[in-house]
Image (cartoon, rainbow, N blue to C red):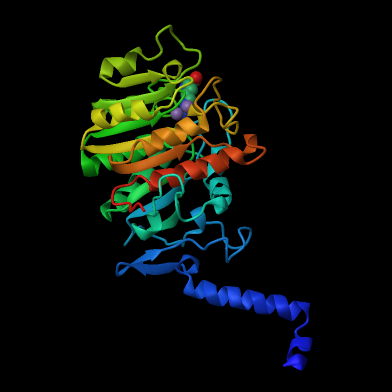
Amino acid sequence: MLSLWRNLNLTNFFSLRQTVALCSARRDPRSNPNRTCSGKRFNVPTSAEFVARVSGIPTMAKLPFQETADGLDAAFVGVPIDTGTSNRPGARFGPRQIRVESAMLRAYNSGTRAAPYESLMVADIGDVNVNMYDLKDTCKRIRTAYRKILATGCIPLTIGGDHTISYPILQAVAEKHGPVGLVHVDAHADTGDVILGDKIGHGTPFRRCVEEGLLDCKRVVQIGLRGTGYSADSYEWSRAQGFRVVQVEECWFKSLAPLMAEVRAQMGSGPVYLSFDIDALDPGFAPGTGTPEIAGLTAIQGVEIIRGCRGLKLVGCDLVEVSPPYDTTGNTALTGANLLFEMLCVLPKIKYY
Ligand SMILES: NC(=[NH2+])NCCC[C@H](N)C(=O)O
Ligand SMILES: [Mn+2]
Ligand SMILES: [Mn+2]
C-alpha cells in the first residue's frame, strides 16, 4: 500500500482527483449533455464544475448544437447582420460574442428558482445564413428560416443582429399565431417610415409590422423610450396605433415590477412576442451598442421586465443590437447572454423549485 502511495506522484494525484471528479460527474446529471427528468430526455449544458468554461465550442450557454429545431421546445438562433444600422455597426458579431460570454451561464436561475433544462428541450441551432450585401434578401432568408423553426413548435430565442430582424421574424410568427402582443424594450420606438429613402432598417421594424397587421396594437407596450427626437412628440405614431408608451422618465428610480403587473394585464392570454434592444439599458450598463442614448434603464430593471413576463404566452423573444467592437470589456455581450437566459426562464412550461 505504502509503495502504491509513493508511486502516486503529484501528477498522478491530480489525475486521480480528476478521475474521481469525472466519475462523480458522470453520475451528476448536470455534466451530461442530456438526461431524463420525469422520464423525458432533456439537453443539459456542460457544467463549469466539470468542464472548463474556456474549453469546448462556444455554443449558447454551452448547450448542444443541432442543425434544425426538430424535437426542441426552445432554441437559440443567431442572426448576424448589421446592415440595417444607422450609426455604429458591429451587431453582426453579436451572436458570436454573446455565445462566447454565455459560457458564464449556469443551469438554474438562482433569483427565480427556474429550472429551464429540467422543463424544456433546448439547443443552439446556429445562425441564419444572412446576405451581407442585401438586407432585403436577408429579411427573406430570416422569414424562411423562422417559418421552418416555428413549424416544429419550437419557440425561437433570437440573438441579434440589429433590430431590423424583428420585422421578418414577426412576419413568420404572425403567419403561425396571427397578430401578436408585443413587449418592446428599447430606447427607440423603431416606428420610422422611410429613413435615408429606405423602408427597411433598424429604425422601422414595428411600423412595417403594424402596416402588415402582424401586431395586436392594443397589446403592444414600448418601455424605455428616450433621447432626442425628429419632432417634439417622437411617440405620437405609436400612441395613435394604440400602443402603450412608457417613456424612460416614468421608469427612473423605481422598480418596474408594478409596471409589469399592468403589462401582464394588458397582454392577457394571447400570444406575445418579446423584443429587447440592448440599448434600452443605459450606456453605462451596455456601452457596446450602435445607437446609445443616455439616462437609460439599469440592468436590474431589464431583468425585472423580463421576469415580469412570466405567465405570458410567449411565442418568441429576441435580444438585439449588441455591438462587440464597441464592447471593450465584453460586459454588454455578457448582459445580453444573461437576459436571453432570463427569457428562457419565463417561457411557458418552465418548472420552478
Ligand atoms: N433599433 C435601434 N437601435 N434603432 C435605432 C433607430 C435610430 C433612428 N432610426 C435614428 O436614425 O435616429
Ligand atoms: Mn434602440
Ligand atoms: Mn431598437
Residue occupying the point 40% across, 50% down: 113
Where 232 sits versus 23, above or below? above
Residue occupying the point 50% across, 67% down: 31
Residue occupying the point 32% across, 37% down: 273
> Which residue reaches farthest front?
2
Q: Nearer the viewer, residue 2 or 231?
A: 2
In the image: residue 237, left or right of residue 134: left
Q: Nearer the viewer, residue 308 or 41?
A: 308
Give the mark count: 0
Q: Residue 202 appears in which quarter of the rendering?
A: top left
Q: Residue 184 appears in which quarter of the rendering?
A: top left
**Residue 63 % position (x, y):** 47, 59
In the image: residue 5, left or right of residue 290: right
Q: Residue 52 appears in which quarter of the rendering?
A: bottom right
**Residue 112 % position (x, y):** 41, 45
| Residue 121, visible in the rendered structure | no
Where 67 sits versus 204, above or below? below
Q: Nearer the viewer, residue 319 or 52?
A: 52
Where 60 sits versus 322, above or below? below
**Residue 11 % position (x, y):** 75, 77
**Residue 115 % position (x, y):** 39, 54
Which part of the image, by quadrant, shows the N terminus?
bottom right
